[in-house]
Amino acid sequence: MMPKIPSWLANTMEKVISNKIYQVEVVGINMLNSNLKCVTFKGDFFDANFMPGNEVLFRVNANEYRHYTLSGFDEANETCEVIFYLNKQGPGHSLAVNIKKGDQLKLIADGAKVKYDEEANQHFFFGDETSLGLYESFGKKVMHEDVEYFGVLELMEENLSAVNQLKLLIDTVPADVNSPAKNAINWMDNMHPICWEMWRNATFYLTGRAKSVQAFKKYLKQKGVSFRQIITAPYWEMGKIGGG
Ligand SMILES: Cc1cc2nc3c(=O)[nH]c(=O)nc-3n(C[C@H](O)[C@H](O)[C@H](O)COP(=O)(O)OP(=O)(O)OC[C@H]3O[C@@H](n4cnc5c(N)ncnc54)[C@H](O)[C@@H]3O)c2cc1C
Protein backbone atom coordinates (compact mmCIF):
# COMPACT_ATOMS: atom_id res chain seq x y z
CA MET A 1 0.00 0.00 0.00
CA MET A 2 1.26 3.47 -0.86
CA PRO A 3 2.15 5.32 2.34
CA LYS A 4 0.88 8.70 1.03
CA ILE A 5 -2.45 9.01 -0.79
CA PRO A 6 -5.15 11.70 -1.15
CA SER A 7 -7.38 11.87 1.93
CA TRP A 8 -10.58 11.19 -0.09
CA LEU A 9 -8.99 7.98 -1.34
CA ALA A 10 -7.81 7.06 2.13
CA ASN A 11 -11.36 7.47 3.43
CA THR A 12 -12.79 5.40 0.54
CA MET A 13 -10.19 2.69 1.04
CA GLU A 14 -11.02 2.40 4.69
CA LYS A 15 -14.64 1.75 3.76
CA VAL A 16 -13.70 -0.88 1.14
CA ILE A 17 -11.42 -2.79 3.51
CA SER A 18 -13.52 -2.07 6.58
CA ASN A 19 -13.72 -5.76 7.51
CA LYS A 20 -10.01 -5.58 8.28
CA ILE A 21 -10.19 -2.37 10.26
CA TYR A 22 -10.52 -2.71 13.99
CA GLN A 23 -11.61 -0.05 16.38
CA VAL A 24 -9.16 -0.53 19.23
CA GLU A 25 -8.58 0.88 22.67
CA VAL A 26 -5.15 1.30 24.21
CA VAL A 27 -5.20 -0.81 27.37
CA GLY A 28 -1.52 -0.97 28.26
CA ILE A 29 1.74 0.86 27.77
CA ASN A 30 5.17 -0.43 28.72
CA MET A 31 8.20 1.75 28.01
CA LEU A 32 11.20 -0.55 27.44
CA ASN A 33 13.21 2.67 27.59
CA SER A 34 12.53 6.24 26.47
CA ASN A 35 12.70 5.22 22.76
CA LEU A 36 10.86 1.90 22.71
CA LYS A 37 7.16 1.91 23.49
CA CYS A 38 5.26 -1.36 23.77
CA VAL A 39 1.52 -0.72 23.38
CA THR A 40 -1.31 -3.20 24.04
CA PHE A 41 -4.54 -2.74 22.05
CA LYS A 42 -7.92 -4.30 22.73
CA GLY A 43 -10.49 -4.85 19.96
CA ASP A 44 -12.93 -7.35 18.46
CA PHE A 45 -10.19 -9.67 17.21
CA PHE A 46 -12.16 -12.94 17.44
CA ASP A 47 -12.10 -13.36 13.63
CA ALA A 48 -8.75 -11.70 12.98
CA ASN A 49 -6.69 -14.89 12.47
CA PHE A 50 -3.50 -13.12 13.40
CA MET A 51 -0.30 -15.01 12.70
CA PRO A 52 3.29 -14.47 13.89
CA GLY A 53 4.75 -11.56 11.94
CA ASN A 54 1.33 -10.05 11.22
CA GLU A 55 1.68 -6.50 10.00
CA VAL A 56 -0.69 -3.66 10.82
CA LEU A 57 -1.14 -0.12 9.54
CA PHE A 58 -2.06 3.04 11.38
CA ARG A 59 -3.29 6.18 9.69
CA VAL A 60 -0.83 8.79 10.92
CA ASN A 61 -2.49 11.86 9.34
CA ALA A 62 -5.05 12.69 6.63
CA ASN A 63 -2.96 11.19 3.82
CA GLU A 64 -0.46 8.76 5.27
CA TYR A 65 -0.26 5.30 6.77
CA ARG A 66 2.66 3.57 8.47
CA HIS A 67 3.45 -0.11 8.86
CA TYR A 68 4.14 -1.82 12.18
CA THR A 69 4.35 -5.45 13.31
CA LEU A 70 2.45 -7.29 16.02
CA SER A 71 4.90 -8.43 18.67
CA GLY A 72 2.17 -10.59 20.17
CA PHE A 73 -1.54 -11.30 20.19
CA ASP A 74 -4.00 -13.07 22.41
CA GLU A 75 -7.22 -13.75 20.53
CA ALA A 76 -8.94 -15.16 23.63
CA ASN A 77 -8.46 -11.88 25.45
CA GLU A 78 -8.79 -9.90 22.20
CA THR A 79 -5.53 -8.04 22.65
CA CYS A 80 -2.47 -7.46 20.50
CA GLU A 81 0.79 -5.57 20.96
CA VAL A 82 3.09 -3.37 18.90
CA ILE A 83 6.61 -2.21 19.79
CA PHE A 84 7.03 1.31 18.42
CA TYR A 85 10.53 2.68 17.93
CA LEU A 86 10.32 6.41 18.61
CA ASN A 87 12.56 7.69 15.82
CA LYS A 88 11.89 11.38 16.72
CA GLN A 89 11.16 12.31 13.10
CA GLY A 90 8.01 11.38 11.19
CA PRO A 91 4.23 11.42 11.77
CA GLY A 92 4.41 7.75 12.78
CA HIS A 93 6.65 8.83 15.64
CA SER A 94 4.22 11.64 16.58
CA LEU A 95 1.34 9.17 16.69
CA ALA A 96 3.30 6.65 18.74
CA VAL A 97 4.80 9.10 21.20
CA ASN A 98 1.37 10.54 22.02
CA ILE A 99 -0.47 7.23 22.44
CA LYS A 100 -1.85 6.90 25.96
CA LYS A 101 -4.02 4.49 27.88
CA GLY A 102 -7.71 4.85 27.01
CA ASP A 103 -7.08 6.23 23.48
CA GLN A 104 -9.35 4.94 20.71
CA LEU A 105 -7.63 4.20 17.38
CA LYS A 106 -8.20 2.37 14.11
CA LEU A 107 -5.89 -0.56 13.50
CA ILE A 108 -5.75 -1.95 9.95
CA ALA A 109 -4.74 -5.61 9.86
CA ASP A 110 -2.49 -6.59 6.96
CA GLY A 111 -0.85 -9.92 6.12
CA ALA A 112 2.63 -11.09 7.06
CA LYS A 113 5.18 -10.40 4.35
CA VAL A 114 7.82 -12.09 6.44
CA LYS A 115 6.39 -15.50 7.23
CA TYR A 116 7.77 -17.88 9.81
CA ASP A 117 9.38 -20.80 7.95
CA GLU A 118 7.59 -23.85 9.38
CA GLU A 119 10.09 -26.21 7.69
CA ALA A 120 13.19 -24.76 9.32
CA ASN A 121 14.74 -26.13 12.50
CA GLN A 122 16.94 -23.09 12.97
CA HIS A 123 15.93 -19.46 12.64
CA PHE A 124 18.44 -16.62 12.49
CA PHE A 125 17.26 -13.03 13.07
CA PHE A 126 19.03 -9.86 11.90
CA GLY A 127 17.58 -6.38 12.31
CA ASP A 128 17.29 -3.27 14.47
CA GLU A 129 14.83 -1.49 16.81
CA THR A 130 12.04 -1.73 14.21
CA SER A 131 12.49 -5.52 13.99
CA LEU A 132 11.91 -6.17 17.70
CA GLY A 133 8.18 -6.82 17.28
CA LEU A 134 8.71 -9.36 14.51
CA TYR A 135 11.40 -11.27 16.38
CA GLU A 136 9.49 -11.14 19.65
CA SER A 137 6.55 -12.82 17.90
CA PHE A 138 8.78 -15.36 16.09
CA GLY A 139 10.62 -16.02 19.36
CA LYS A 140 7.31 -16.99 21.01
CA LYS A 141 6.49 -19.29 18.08
CA VAL A 142 9.91 -20.98 18.31
CA MET A 143 9.31 -21.66 22.01
CA HIS A 144 6.27 -23.76 21.08
CA GLU A 145 8.25 -25.91 18.66
CA ASP A 146 11.31 -28.03 19.14
CA VAL A 147 13.54 -25.67 17.16
CA GLU A 148 16.27 -23.10 17.78
CA TYR A 149 16.75 -19.43 17.14
CA PHE A 150 19.57 -16.99 17.38
CA GLY A 151 20.56 -13.67 15.89
CA VAL A 152 22.09 -10.23 16.11
CA LEU A 153 20.50 -6.79 16.24
CA GLU A 154 22.26 -3.54 15.45
CA LEU A 155 20.89 -0.90 17.81
CA MET A 156 21.58 2.70 18.68
CA GLU A 157 23.91 2.78 21.70
CA GLU A 158 21.15 4.04 24.03
CA ASN A 159 18.88 1.08 23.19
CA LEU A 160 21.35 -1.77 23.68
CA SER A 161 20.23 -2.68 27.19
CA ALA A 162 16.46 -2.19 26.67
CA VAL A 163 16.24 -5.44 24.71
CA ASN A 164 17.10 -7.48 27.81
CA GLN A 165 13.56 -6.88 29.06
CA LEU A 166 12.13 -8.82 26.12
CA LYS A 167 13.91 -12.07 27.05
CA LEU A 168 14.92 -12.47 23.42
CA LEU A 169 17.93 -14.75 22.95
CA ILE A 170 19.54 -12.39 20.48
CA ASP A 171 22.88 -10.61 20.69
CA THR A 172 23.19 -6.89 20.14
CA VAL A 173 25.87 -4.69 18.59
CA PRO A 174 25.97 -0.88 18.34
CA ALA A 175 24.77 0.46 14.99
CA ASP A 176 27.28 2.46 12.96
CA VAL A 177 25.03 4.76 10.89
CA ASN A 178 27.79 5.36 8.34
CA SER A 179 28.58 1.66 7.85
CA PRO A 180 25.31 -0.27 7.79
CA ALA A 181 25.59 -3.82 9.19
CA LYS A 182 29.37 -3.49 9.67
CA ASN A 183 29.39 -4.31 13.38
CA ALA A 184 26.94 -7.17 12.93
CA ILE A 185 29.13 -8.63 10.18
CA ASN A 186 32.21 -8.34 12.44
CA TRP A 187 30.24 -10.13 15.12
CA MET A 188 29.43 -12.91 12.62
CA ASP A 189 33.09 -13.14 11.62
CA ASN A 190 34.05 -13.62 15.26
CA MET A 191 31.71 -16.57 15.60
CA HIS A 192 33.38 -19.94 16.04
CA PRO A 193 33.58 -21.79 12.67
CA ILE A 194 31.61 -24.63 14.23
CA CYS A 195 28.61 -22.25 14.51
CA TRP A 196 28.62 -21.74 10.75
CA GLU A 197 28.70 -25.49 10.32
CA MET A 198 25.79 -25.96 12.75
CA TRP A 199 23.70 -23.14 11.28
CA ARG A 200 24.30 -24.17 7.66
CA ASN A 201 20.64 -24.95 7.00
CA ALA A 202 19.05 -22.15 9.00
CA THR A 203 16.49 -19.71 7.62
CA PHE A 204 17.84 -16.16 7.86
CA TYR A 205 15.37 -13.29 8.38
CA LEU A 206 16.75 -9.83 7.60
CA THR A 207 14.65 -6.77 8.43
CA GLY A 208 15.13 -3.14 9.50
CA ARG A 209 17.23 -0.50 7.76
CA ALA A 210 17.31 -1.15 3.98
CA LYS A 211 21.07 -0.61 3.58
CA SER A 212 21.83 -2.92 6.50
CA VAL A 213 19.57 -5.63 5.10
CA GLN A 214 21.33 -5.31 1.74
CA ALA A 215 24.84 -5.45 3.25
CA PHE A 216 24.01 -8.39 5.53
CA LYS A 217 22.46 -10.32 2.64
CA LYS A 218 25.57 -9.77 0.52
CA TYR A 219 27.70 -11.05 3.40
CA LEU A 220 25.58 -14.18 3.83
CA LYS A 221 25.85 -14.89 0.10
CA GLN A 222 29.64 -14.61 0.35
CA LYS A 223 29.53 -17.12 3.19
CA GLY A 224 27.72 -19.57 0.92
CA VAL A 225 24.17 -19.21 2.27
CA SER A 226 21.71 -19.86 -0.56
CA PHE A 227 19.08 -17.32 -1.65
CA ARG A 228 16.20 -19.59 -0.70
CA GLN A 229 17.37 -19.53 2.94
CA ILE A 230 17.26 -15.74 3.13
CA ILE A 231 14.04 -13.76 3.74
CA THR A 232 14.41 -9.98 3.53
CA ALA A 233 12.10 -7.05 4.31
CA PRO A 234 13.54 -3.52 4.35
CA TYR A 235 11.54 -1.44 6.86
CA TRP A 236 13.08 2.04 6.52
CA GLU A 237 16.00 4.00 5.13
CA MET A 238 17.52 7.34 6.07
CA GLY A 239 15.83 10.18 4.18
CA LYS A 240 13.03 7.94 2.91
CA ILE A 241 9.47 8.76 3.98
CA GLY A 242 6.93 6.09 4.76
CA GLY A 243 9.18 3.14 5.59
CA GLY A 244 9.52 0.02 3.44
C1 LIG B 1 6.35 -4.30 7.11
C2 LIG B 1 6.90 -3.27 8.07
C3 LIG B 1 6.83 -3.51 9.44
C4 LIG B 1 7.34 -2.56 10.35
N1 LIG B 1 7.26 -2.80 11.70
C5 LIG B 1 7.68 -1.85 12.59
C6 LIG B 1 7.52 -2.03 14.00
O1 LIG B 1 6.97 -3.03 14.48
N2 LIG B 1 7.96 -1.04 14.82
C7 LIG B 1 8.55 0.11 14.33
O2 LIG B 1 8.94 0.98 15.13
N3 LIG B 1 8.71 0.31 13.02
C8 LIG B 1 8.28 -0.63 12.13
N4 LIG B 1 8.42 -0.43 10.79
C9 LIG B 1 9.17 0.77 10.33
C10 LIG B 1 8.33 2.03 10.24
O3 LIG B 1 7.19 1.82 9.43
C11 LIG B 1 9.23 3.12 9.62
O4 LIG B 1 10.32 3.38 10.47
C12 LIG B 1 8.48 4.39 9.29
O5 LIG B 1 9.30 5.17 8.44
C13 LIG B 1 8.12 5.21 10.53
O6 LIG B 1 7.33 6.29 10.11
P1 LIG B 1 7.55 7.79 10.62
O7 LIG B 1 6.32 8.52 10.20
O8 LIG B 1 7.97 7.78 12.05
O9 LIG B 1 8.79 8.32 9.76
P2 LIG B 1 8.75 8.74 8.20
O10 LIG B 1 7.85 9.89 7.96
O11 LIG B 1 8.51 7.52 7.38
O12 LIG B 1 10.25 9.20 7.99
C14 LIG B 1 10.74 10.46 8.49
C15 LIG B 1 12.24 10.37 8.64
O13 LIG B 1 12.53 9.47 9.68
C16 LIG B 1 13.50 8.52 9.25
N5 LIG B 1 13.25 7.23 9.91
C17 LIG B 1 12.19 6.40 9.75
N6 LIG B 1 12.35 5.30 10.51
C18 LIG B 1 13.52 5.44 11.16
C19 LIG B 1 14.25 4.64 12.08
N7 LIG B 1 13.79 3.46 12.50
N8 LIG B 1 15.44 5.11 12.54
C20 LIG B 1 15.94 6.30 12.15
N9 LIG B 1 15.30 7.10 11.27
C21 LIG B 1 14.11 6.68 10.79
C22 LIG B 1 13.30 8.44 7.74
O14 LIG B 1 14.50 8.07 7.10
C23 LIG B 1 12.93 9.86 7.37
O15 LIG B 1 14.08 10.62 7.13
C24 LIG B 1 7.93 -1.35 9.86
C25 LIG B 1 7.98 -1.12 8.47
C26 LIG B 1 7.48 -2.06 7.59
C27 LIG B 1 7.54 -1.78 6.11
Image (tube, rainbow, N blue to C red):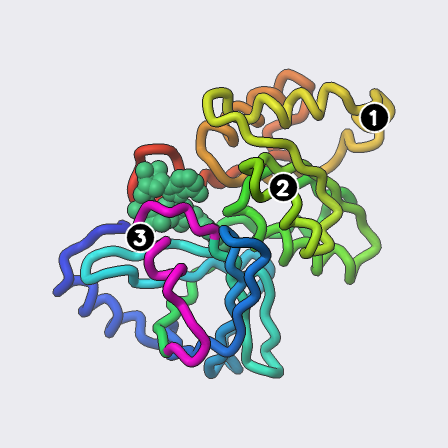
The quarter holding residue 175 reads: top right
The disc at residue 112 is: none
Q: Give the amino acid at mark 2.
A: Leu
Q: Nearer the viewer, residue 163 or 114?
A: 163
Q: Is residue 58 magenta?
A: no
Q: Which residue corresponds to mark 1?
A: 197
Q: Which residue corresponds to mark 3?
A: 1
Q: Which residue corresponds to mark 2?
A: 160
The quarter holding residue 145 reads: bottom right
At x 36% / y 74%, what residue is drawn? 105
At x 19% / y 69%, what residue is drawn? 11
Q: Which residues are magenta?
A: 85-103
Q: Quadrant of the C terminus?
A: top left
Q: Give the amino acid at mark 1.
A: Glu
Q: Give the amino acid at mark 3.
A: Met
At x 61% / y 20%, what residue is drawn? 219
Instruction: Assess disc 2: are there few (<14), some (14-19) or many (≥20) residues with their C-alpha within 10 Å of its C-alpha.
Output: some
The quarter holding residue 95 reads: bottom left
Residue 103 in the image: state x and y as whole percent. 38, 77
Residue 108 in the image: state x and y as whole percent. 38, 67
Residue 199 drawn above or below residue 166:
above
Mark 3–mark 1 Cα distance, whole angstroms, equals: 40 Å
First-in-chain label (2 vs 3):
3
Q: Is residue 91 magenta?
A: yes
Please, what secondary structure does the residue beneath circle 2 have? loop
Instruction: Assess disc 3: are there few (<14), some (14-19) or many (≥20) residues with their C-alpha within 10 Å of its C-alpha.
Output: few
Is residue 231 visible in the rendered image? The answer is no
> Quick check: 19 left or right of 168?
left
Please, what secondary structure does the residue beneath circle 1 have? helix
